[in-house]
Image (spheres, grey):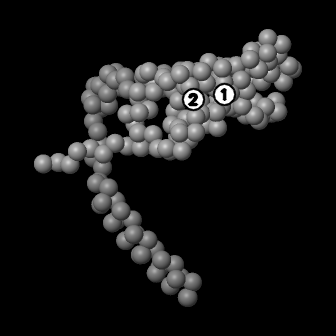
Amino acid sequence: MSKPKKSQVMKPSTAALKLDVYLPATPQEFQDGMVSREELDEMQRNPPQWLADLRRDGPHPRNVVAARLRVSNSGLARGGITEPLTTAQIAELAADPPQWLVRERETHAENKREERRLQAQREEAAAAAAAPAPAKRAAKAQPAAGQRKKAQPAAGQRKKAQPAQRKKAQPNSKRAANR
């Protein structure tokens, strides 16, 4: 018989990251204890009141603030935002965006467009590589009418023949130099 599975547990900081909440704003009992995978799943399905309040009002971690302002985490740092913001502060920034926010939104949108373009290019290349090329394969398999393939020595035979030729050439050149 196999042992019963032991529940996987994680640190509160990992659980807060997965729940998209700012750890110092969570209740003390959440910060002090370990969170099992089952507890995390239950919190995501049926969030307790404190989690619903944090998600609605904040303070929010950097990744949530950046997503709500439609900028990157680096853009927040360049704009001087280093502290977590509440929903009201985010709404205030979005309503009357400062110059840095407008610039970072444009930069972020441009980067996203470029990522989508590159992803489409990679997908097209992968599709082209995966698609069979029957005309090329048929041409390689069958020689053209009236043409025959030339017999070529095996790769191992060529390698053996080349060093022997070099050995003969080297002594002759030394003899010629000594004469």
What secondary structure is found at the residue carrying circle 1? loop
Which amino acid, mark 2? Asp
Residue 25 position (above or below residue 107): below
Which residue carries the number 2 mark?
Answer: 20
Q: Say which of 127 and 1 sits in front.
A: 1
Residue at the spot 57% in from the left edge and 83% down from the top edge: 177
Q: Mark 1 packing: few (<14 Cα in 10 Å), some, or many (20+)?
A: many
Residue at the spot 29% in from the left edge and 60% down from the top edge: 157
- The mark found on residue 133 in the picture is none
In the rendering, at what x and y percent does residue 143 appear? 29, 30
- The mark found on residue 60 in the picture is 1
Residue at the spot 29% in from the left edge and 39% down from the top edge: 149
Residue 20 position (above or below residue 95): below
In the rendering, at what x and y percent does residue 75 appear? 75, 30
Task: Decide which of tag 1 and tag 2 comes sooner along the chain.
Answer: 2
Is 168 on the left-hand or right-hand side of 15?
Answer: left
Alpha carbon separation for disc pair 1 and 2 = 8 Å
